[in-house]
Amino acid sequence: MKNLEVPKIYSIKSTEKETLGKWFRLMTIGRAIDEKAPNYLKQAIGWSYHAPYAGHDGIQLAVGQYFEKNKDHIFLYYRDMLTALSSGLEPEEIILNGISKATDPSSGGRHMSNHFAKPEWNIHNVSSLTGNHTLHAVGVARAIKYYGEKAVAISSQGESSLSEGFVYEAINGADKEKLPVIFVIQDNGYGISVPKKDQTANRKVANNFTGFKNIRIIHCNGKDVFDSMNAMAEAKRFALDESLPVLLQANCIRIQSHSNSDKHELYRSETERNYVIEYDPLAKFRRLLIRYKRFTGEELHEIEESVKKEVKAAHRAALKAPDPDPSTIYDFVIPDPVKPKKYPEGVHNEKGEKIKLITALNETLKAEFRHNPDTFIWGQDMSNKDKGGIFNVSKGLQQEFGPKRVFNAPIAEDFIMGTANGMSRYNEKIRIVVEGAEFADYFWPAMEQYVDSSHDYWRSNGKFTPNVTIRLASGGYIGGGLYHSQNIEGALVSIPGVRIAYPSFADDAAGLLRTAIRSRGLTMFMEPKALYQDPRAATVVPDDFEVPFGKARIRREGSGLTVVTYGNTTHMCIEAAIELEKEGFSIEVIDLRSLIPLDREAIINSIKKTNKALVVHEDKVHGGFGGEIASIIMEDAFEWLDGPVRRVGSTFTPVGFHRILERAILPNTEKIVSAARDLLNY
């Protein structure tokens, strides 16, 4: 490490008067709005969530002054009002956010107040989940390093957020990858009402990371403008020059309650509340400017009067701004995927050699990496010598495309998902594929990042969408048992903002994967791992084959019963249809291929023809996606039905390890034949 002393660049005596005046004006504007915000709620105008920043003035001013818009990337947390102003946002934009107007640059009123952003400047829109944006900062810093730009990513947050496991994952990852990230920790001693002593044993929480190899830890007085400026100057110098991460912990105070829904009188003594007011950073800075004769009281008063007029004008302008239009709620849920040109229906009649599903995936990944040099993939077990993922789907990618585009991630699913979100923020060309977990059942630790990513496009009012494809080896029939054989799509389909693909054959796997990677937005790509090497799933796969989302495929035409299915059970349904045909029954089998969007038209049209419906999937019947399909059929095709909608799926139990238990739990051809026969004879 280089010299750990922070060089003293700024002081009350040496700093130019013009600069001091600018700082005082920004601090005064920020405090004026900070104190005015609760009144909006009292007057029923808005700002129902406000977290006062008073007491964090020094560090927030400094962070904003060292952020270079359109070059650096910054992730603010909900208390960062002065940071936002210091970074360049106008008072009117702050108020527009606070009262949730349609012209709010952060989200157009879609996200909570006090979440300040301007994505077009790289002031990123973040969620309310404490500290999760640390992972996004690490991801975008990875892109900064890969593309060789002289810039930094800044993550700003409170000290209590370091209790979160995913914050540790972010800091560990930045340290391992040697990334130019500045983690600014604003320590006011409380996580809402929880004192710091209940969060960590270390009085200075950044010192929890002293054992990390590459990270630089800097402490400063976040109440003091000059100490904060000097610390931030050194943090940015180090991150830029050394391309290494920095933990900058700023000691602050919280003058007011945590937020307008909190009453700090319930847990802070009057003595403590008076103490923090006495150490008000703005009042101290004002006194210094006069004591050292940098400004007269009259000059500062003139600035303060000017600020009052500016904030008043901003208030009036913001009140006149339009409210969000309720008719826009369906805008920006998910971007439209690319539309296949060569194979618009996702169907082909090519002849030739059949390849297995795993080979189709592998060859498609390689083709897409050649097609777009800004494509990346990472996950667990991705690239150690000749191995390529737990099932070798990505085998050979690192050898061809190198370790900077194909690499291993720590065993940390949240990190895998969160840094994918972050890296995709760097530019629109980037396409990212991740193995979200080695098995779909292990994806749950990444769910907070999955949910966050799912509403990025909507929450940012269309300004950002993560262009990420998440691959998961899903399902059973391998004797894997718990954490190796469960299905999770029943839970995932309830979350808007993500396309969900679930192929059954090699050509569809290739075509859907290609469409997913080339499209903007987030796609969950479920791979039925039992079919990787299964000859039943092998097909001819044309070059550049594409399959559109939301377009089902009729695998077998019939007139007596519609079977709606996907994934592993598609082949069982085809086998069941062949068996029942021997008994004189005509079965139509519809392979959905994608669950979101869903081809409702294909389902309804088939039922109009057959008048009966059986929904089959590997997942549990209870809570499975089949319930949604059955509901759609009942609502849109009830008048054509000649019998109840039946469902076949697994039992409402975990999937057991022993093959006897697995067979009892999961659906099979025999169970499908039995259910279909009953319905046909209804």
Image (cartoon, helix red, strand yellow):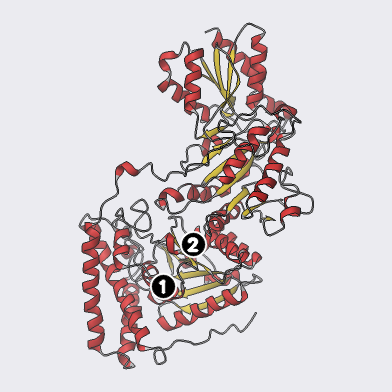
- Which picture quadrant has residue 23? bottom left
Q: Gap between marks 2 and 1, in whole Å? A: 17 Å
Above-or-below relation of 349 to 169: above
> Which quarter shows the N terminus?
bottom right
Give the camera-side residue of 624 and 610. 610
Circle 2 sits on which residue? 161
Q: Is residue 645 visible?
A: no
- Indicate which disc, 2 or 1, sits on the residue closer to the N terminus: 1
Spot occupied by residue 128 in the image (x, y as percentages of width and height): 43, 55
Spot occupied by residue 521 in the image (x, y as percentages of width and height): 51, 47
Q: State left or right for residue 334 relative to residue 112.
A: right
Circle 1 sits on which residue? 60
Mark 2–mark 1 CB contact (< 8 Å): no
Q: Farthest residue toward the right?
A: 386
- Which picture quadrant has residue 314? bottom left
Spot occupied by residue 299 in the image (x, y as percentages of width and height): 25, 87
Q: Secondary structure at mark 1?
A: helix
Give the camera-side residue of 498 and 263. 498
Q: Residue at x 53, y 84 (%)?
A: 6
Q: Residue at x 68, y 36 (%)?
A: 529
Q: Nearer the viewer, mark 2 or mark 1?
A: 1
Q: Is residue 100 visible?
A: yes
Q: State left or right for residue 220 relative to residue 589.
A: left
Q: Secondary structure at mark 2?
A: helix
Q: How many marks?
A: 2
Q: Amino acid at mark 1?
A: Gln
Spot occupied by residue 210 in the image (x, y as percentages of width and height): 61, 72
Q: State left or right for residue 439 relative to residue 629.
A: right
- Which picture quadrant has residue 238? bottom right
Above-or-below relation of 245 to 40: below
Q: Amino acid at mark 2?
A: Ser
Above-or-below relation of 223 to 607: below
